């Protein structure tokens, strides 16, 4: 890809900028255990990578025939924030990647704005993105709908065909494809072939992606 083939780089947050998916999954599985449900942590990590908490709850409640308490989300969010402050790390090589890019960048995540901003601060990535954060909770429909990606492109006045997206999950890749954007898939929690079938160009690590975008 040459330097003039895109005008905006849109990053997902969890699993792309910060290694937060395992933390969220750990809290989620632990909370389910407290309500008497033992589930496979690795399976849930693969199944719900990139999914909003409300989507996780909807699927899980049907699977387990269970009605989650009304305070599940705020308790989950509080516990995840605490764990994030203690253990969150940036994805290896992400600083070098973002520093190598000369085009505008932003973030489009299914997470809440405050959650994303906290993770950027902890991972020392805030300086690269400032306030350019778009949340799936602030558009009509979160990923896999294209809304949050289209909102990002519209805010930068860039046509979707001139945007590239960095994702790591099937819902995220699906959202980018539906938005009409080229998408690269970080094969961390999701297998490369699964990402490819969803419409992404898979890559193994940020150094590889850096070379692909050079």
Image: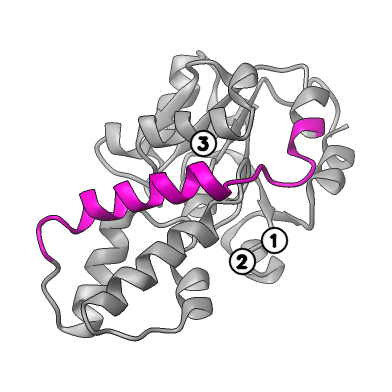
**Quarter containing the C terminus:** top right
Q: Which residue is painted at 28% across and 43% down in the image?
A: 141
Query: Taking the image as drawn, is residue 93 in sight?
Result: yes
Q: Secondary structure at mark 3?
A: helix
How many residues crowd mark 3 within 10 Å: few (<14), some (14–19), many (20+)? many
Q: Are marks 3 and 2 in contact (CB under 8 Å)?
A: no
Relative to 105, 139 lies left or right: left
Give, as a single range, the part of the protein colored magenta.
Answer: 69-96
* Colour pattern of the rendering: one colour
Q: Image quadrant of residue 181?
A: top right
Q: Secondary structure at mark 1?
A: loop
Residue beneath label 3, please? 119
Residue beneath label 1, please? 187
Q: Are marks 1 and 2 in contact (CB under 8 Å)?
A: yes
Between marks 3 and 2 in the image, the one whose residue lies nearer the viewer: 3
Q: Which residue is painted at 24% across and 37% down in the image?
A: 140
As drawn, the label of residue 81 is: none
Residue beneath label 2, please? 190
Q: Which residue is painted at 9% across and 57% down in the image?
A: 70
Labels in figure, total: 3
Please check the rendered image and state whether residue 87 is part of the magenta-colored stretch, yes or no: yes
Counting residues from the N terminus, which is met first, the one under dot 1 or under dot 3? 3
Between marks 1 and 3 in the image, the one whose residue lies nearer the viewer: 3
């Amino acid at each position: 890809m040459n330097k003039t083939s895109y005008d905006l780089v849109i990053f997902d947050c969890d699993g792309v900028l910060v290694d937060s998916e395992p933390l969220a999954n750990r809290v989620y599985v632990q909370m389910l255990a407290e309500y008497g449900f033992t589930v496979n942590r690795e399976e849930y990590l693969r199944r719900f990578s990139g999914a909003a908490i409300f989507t996780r709850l909807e699927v899980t409640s049907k699977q387990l025939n269970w009605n989650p308490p009304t305070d599940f989300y705020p308790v989950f969010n509080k516990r995840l924030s605490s764990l994030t402050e203690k253990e969150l790390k940036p994805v290896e090589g992400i600083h070098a990647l973002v520093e190598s890019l000369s085009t505008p960048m932003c973030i489009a995540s299914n997470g809440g704005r405050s959650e994303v901003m906290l993770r950027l601060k902890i991972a020392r990535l805030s300086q690269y993105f400032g306030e350019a954060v778009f949340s799936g909770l602030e558009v009509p429909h979160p990923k896999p709908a294209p809304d949050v990606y289209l909102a990002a492109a519209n805010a930068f006045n860039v046509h979707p065909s001139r945007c590239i997206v960095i994702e790591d999950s099937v819902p995220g890749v699906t959202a980018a494809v539906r938005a009409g954007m080229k998408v690269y898939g970080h094969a961390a929690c999701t297998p490369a072939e699964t990402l490819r079938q969803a419409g992404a160009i898979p890559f193994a690590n940020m150094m590889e992606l850096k070379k692909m975008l050079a």
